[in-house]
């Protein structure tokens, strides 16, 4: 299973250098994480990350999603399989 967790930026930088910060509690980060479904699409992940936003328009080529303002993604990218940290031929 993949999980999105929210941690303090300083804690993250500290851990990248091989240290465990005193303020970081792995249990709560995991407990409060957001699971990413198996075989998720990019659109599935966007909807999980921005739970309060919604799809507010679709065409044959695009999906409009309200995040900060109206954001449009190509339908090809929206429906493509999610690749954690990878690059995709299906760029926005």
Image (cartoon, rainbow, N blue to C red):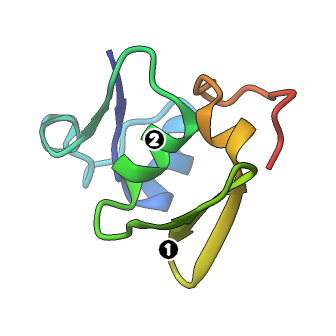
Disc 2 and disc 1 in contact, CB within 8 angstroms: no
Residue sitting nearer the eye, 53 or 57: 57
The number of discs equals 2
Q: Secondary structure at mark 2?
A: helix
Instruction: Determine the CA span between mark 2 and mark 1.
Output: 13 Å
Residue at 48% of width from left, 38% of height from top? 15
Q: Determine crowd level at label 1: few under 14, some 14-19, many 20+ residues with C-alpha closer than 10 A.
A: some
- Residue 30: which numbered mark, if any? none
Q: Determine crowd level at label 2: few under 14, some 14-19, many 20+ residues with C-alpha closer than 10 A.
A: some
Residue at 45% of width from left, 41% of height from top? 45
- Residue linked to disc 1: 67
Q: Secondary structure at mark 1?
A: loop
Residue 36, percent across and down?
A: 35, 30
**Horizontal relation, residue 83 to residue 32: left or right:** right
Residue at 49% of width from left, 60% of height from top? 9
Q: Quadrant of the N terminus?
A: top left
| Location of residue 65 with respect to 85 vertically, above or below | below
| Location of residue 45 with respect to 89 vertically, above or below | below
Counting residues from the start of the chain, the first of labels 2 and 1 encountered is: 2
Residue at 35% of width from left, 52% of height from top? 6
- Residue 45: which numbered mark, if any? 2
Residue sitting nearer the eye, 17 or 58: 58
Residue 18, percent across and down?
A: 53, 29
């Amino acid at each position: 299973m993949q999980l999105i967790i929210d941690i303090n930026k300083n804690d993250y930088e500290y851990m990248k250098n091989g240290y465990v910060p005193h303020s970081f509690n792995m249990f709560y980060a995991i407990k409060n994480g957001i699971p990413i479904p198996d075989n998720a699409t990019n659109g599935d992940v966007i909807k999980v990350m921005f739970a309060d936003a919604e799809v507010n328009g679709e065409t044959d080529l695009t999906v409009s999603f309200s995040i900060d303002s109206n954001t449009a993604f190509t339908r090809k990218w929206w429906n493509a399989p999610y690749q954690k940290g990878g690059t995709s031929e299906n760029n926005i």
